[in-house]
Amino acid sequence: MEQVRNIVILTGAGVSAESGIGTFRDAGGLWENHRVEDVATPEAFARDPDLVFRFYDTRREQVLQVEPNAAHHALARLQREWPARTGGSVMLVTQNVDDLHDRALGAADGAEVIHMHGEHLSAWCTACDGRTRWTASLIDSPPCPSCGAPALRPDIVWFGEMPYRMDEIFAALEDADLFVSIGTSGAVYPAAGFVRTAADMGAHTLELNLEPSQGTDWFDEARHGPATQTVPVWVEEMLKGKG
Ligand code: BV8
């Protein structure tokens, strides 16, 4: 593997599984017998807003009761230490809408977590387009703290909606020496296509997952096992000998 400076990491539900947040595949892709695609879409929200509010209010509550695990903490350590040790960069992109990466990272200057599919702990006002940190429920249509309109929705990217910060993510993929995918099945696009973009741009590609993902053939290297075991070992390897 060439000299690695710039790393792009993509995570999915598997990195939070050992913190007690079920993955999409775990439940066979279902929530209360609703296909996820039937509650995580603008059409579902228009058709039955209470059903969608309950889906997210329940999951938002759950996030507040769980803690980051060893995989989240190891990745936060890499984000804090790699740039100082190598002059390189680490971009952490997550499909997860929980805040476990953020809590593990804490206020590390210059480092952040890019939530390409949004966040549970954020509410989006469809009247003034404002976004506000939110930990309570949304089902009773509380007023927007900025404009007062009862127009808050979960700040989540639903199926059919454009994921966030795509320009920054693709720019980093084009510059990456190493692309690492952790705890994701590779079932949902555009995230599932990142490995091909990175590979086409010459990056080395590594999959850390419990089992081979749908895109496993696109990876130069794969290590299978629980994230709390594979990720700390990999981070230790990356930082070893780096001053
Ligand atoms: C868009 C927020 C267009 C909601 C989510 C190309 C081909 C086919 C279809 C499409 C395509 N392009 C677009 C589509 C449509 C669609 C899509 O991909 N559909 C799929 C179902 C085929 N994509 C979209 O709609 C996207 N938007 O394309 O917009 C557009 C373009 C221009 C302008 C406007 C619009 C938006 C997709 C985002 C939807 N929102 N999340 C919410 O969370 O409620 S997606 C959601 O599902 C997650 O964020 C994540 O992305 C995905 C679930 O995947 P994973 O995270 O990987 O979880 P999963 O359970 O599947 O797998 C877990 C893995 O972990 C497993 O492999 C397991 O083995 C492993 N694991 C388990 N335990 C552990 C572990 N690994 C390690 N350790 C463990 N302990």
Image (cartoon, rainbow, N blue to C red):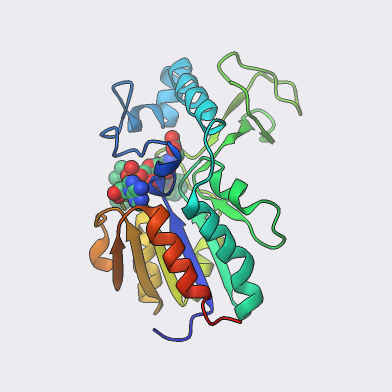
**Count of marks, rendered view:** 0
Q: Residue at x 67, y 34 (%)?
A: 133
Looking at the image, is 114 positioned above or below residue 132? below
Q: Residue furthest top?
A: 140
Q: Residue furthest right?
A: 146
Residue 19 in picture, x, y percent from top left: 45, 41
Q: Would you identify the image quadrant in which residue 134 lies?
A: top right
Residue 97 in picture, x, y percent from top left: 50, 41
Q: Residue at x 36, y 75 (%)?
A: 200
Q: Residue at x 41, y 27 (%)?
A: 43
Residue 68 in picture, x, y percent from top left: 53, 45
Task: Please name whichever residue, 24 or 18, is drawn nearer the observer in this view of the structure.
Answer: 18
Task: Please name whichever residue, 32 or 38, is drawn nearer the observer in this view of the structure.
Answer: 32
Ligand 1 located in image quadrant: top left
Q: Would you identify the image quadrant in which residue 40 lies?
A: top left
Residue 241 in picture, x, y percent from top left: 53, 82
Quadrant location of the N terminus in the rendered image: bottom left
Q: Is residue 197 left or right of residue 9?
A: left
Task: Please name whichever residue, 232 or 6, is drawn nearer the observer in this view of the structure.
Answer: 232
Q: Residue at x 70, y 19 (%)?
A: 143
Looking at the image, is 150 positioned above or below residue 128? above
Visible in this render: residue 28?
A: yes
Visible in this render: residue 187?
A: no
Q: Residue furthest bottom?
A: 2
Quadrant location of the C terminus in the rendered image: bottom right
Looking at the image, is 242 positioned above or below residue 21? below
